[in-house]
């Protein structure tokens, strides 16, 4: 699994490098255009900065500015979550504790 994740990350970095390598100058506009392909990759966050450390591109900002994408992400996350997880964990711990006293 680790090697698979490493390979995926290396491939994503290769796509980013390729996308940015053709730019003569890094500006917010041309970096955003070049990184449009990278947004569709499996990376969770990408930051591109200039030599002064100024953020030119941030996938998190793009997500915050896109209500449809936030809605899709929220729906996907809610399908993975358990609303009453803390109560279930507490009940399981108390059950295990009571079994240990017998």
Image (cartoon, rainbow, N blue to C red):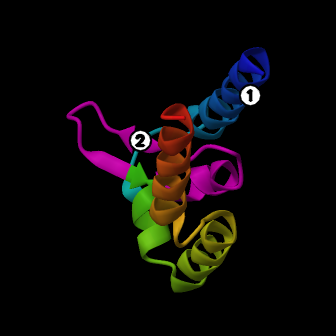
The residue that mark 2 highlights is 48
Quadrant of res 18: top right
Residue 93 drawn above or below residue 82:
above
Tell me how many marks there are: 2
Residue 51 position, x and y percent, is 27, 30
42 left or right of 69 in image: right
Q: Quadrant where the N terminus lies?
A: top right
The residue drawn where x is 39% and y is 64% is 61
Tell me if mark 1 has few (under 14), some (14-19) or many (20+) residues whose alpha carbon lies within 10 angstroms of its own: few
Residue 72 drawn above or below residue 30:
below
Q: Is residue 45 visible?
A: no
Q: Quadrant where the C terminus lies?
A: top right
Residue 87 position, x and y percent, is 47, 64
Tell me if mark 2 has few (under 14), some (14-19) or many (20+) residues whose alpha carbon lies within 10 angstroms of its own: many
Between marks 2 and 1 in the image, the one whose residue lies nearer the viewer: 1
Residue 47 position, x and y percent, is 41, 43
């Amino acid at each position: 699994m680790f090697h698979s994740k490493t390979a995926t990350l290396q491939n994503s970095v290769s796509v980013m490098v390729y996308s940015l390598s053709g730019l003569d100058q890094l500006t917010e506009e041309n970096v955003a255009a070049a990184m449009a392909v990278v947004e569709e990759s499996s990376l969770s966050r990408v930051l591109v900065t200039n030599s002064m450390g100024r953020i030119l591109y941030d996938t998190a900002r793009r997500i915050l500015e896109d209500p449809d994408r936030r809605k899709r992400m929220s729906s996907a996350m809610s399908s993975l979550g358990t609303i009453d997880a803390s109560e279930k964990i507490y009940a399981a711990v108390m059950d295990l504790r009571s079994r240990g006293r017998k």
